[in-house]
Image (tube, rainbow, N blue to C red):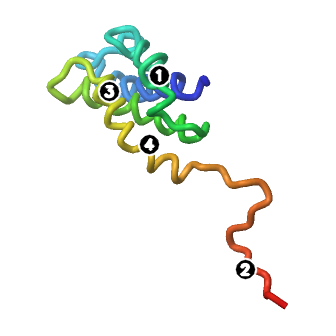
Amino acid sequence: SWHIPVSFLLGVVILSGLTHIANPARYADPLFHIFAGSVIIGAFFMATDYVTSPTYPLGMIIFGLGCGLITMVIRLWAGFPEGVSFAILIMNAFVPLIERYTRPKKFGSKPWAEPEAAS
């Protein structure tokens, strides 16, 4: 599915683009961050692992965005030059929570309906 890789790359581009616009002398442009390190491998091969990634499309997008944003926070302001693996591990811890709140409703279900009275 395209959801995780595209949203992962979008998260990297958003945060690196904002920091580059704020101070281009200090922060590299988004293309550098996309092609440097293991962002491409992480987005397409590591984050899309079936066992640890969300199963529903909205959850996949939230997971990918979180991975991309955390990767850039680690790269820009932490002591490590590469943060893809750590970002994916951190977001893996949140997958059950993401799955709980992004699960689609069953067709025809009404969770607010009162049970019928027994006659």
Q: Residue furthest front?
A: 119
Which disc number belongs to residue 95?
Answer: 4
User: Which of disc 4 and disc 2 is earlier in sequence?
Assistant: 4
Which label number is shown at residue 72? Answer: 3
Q: Residue at x 32, y 37 (%)?
A: 90
- Left or right: residue 29 versus residue 3 is left
Where's residue 52, x and y in %? 44, 33
Q: SS at mark 2?
A: loop
Mark found first going from the N terminus, 3 or 2: 3
Q: Residue furthest bottom?
A: 119
Q: Quadrant of the N terminus?
A: top right
Q: Nearer the viewer, mark 4 or mark 1?
A: 4
- Reading the image, the residue beneath label 2 is 114
Residue at 60% over, 49% down? 103
**x and y, in percent, of residue 3 in the image:** 58, 28
Residue drawn at (46%, 17%) of the image:
45
The amino acid beneath tag 2 is Glu
Disc 3 marks a residue whose amino acid type is: Met
Sequence-wise, the earlier of marks 3 and 4 is: 3
Structural distance between the alpha carbons of marks 2 and 4: 31 Å
Circles 3 and 2: CB atoms closer than 8 Å: no
Residue position marked by numbered label 1 in the rendering: 9
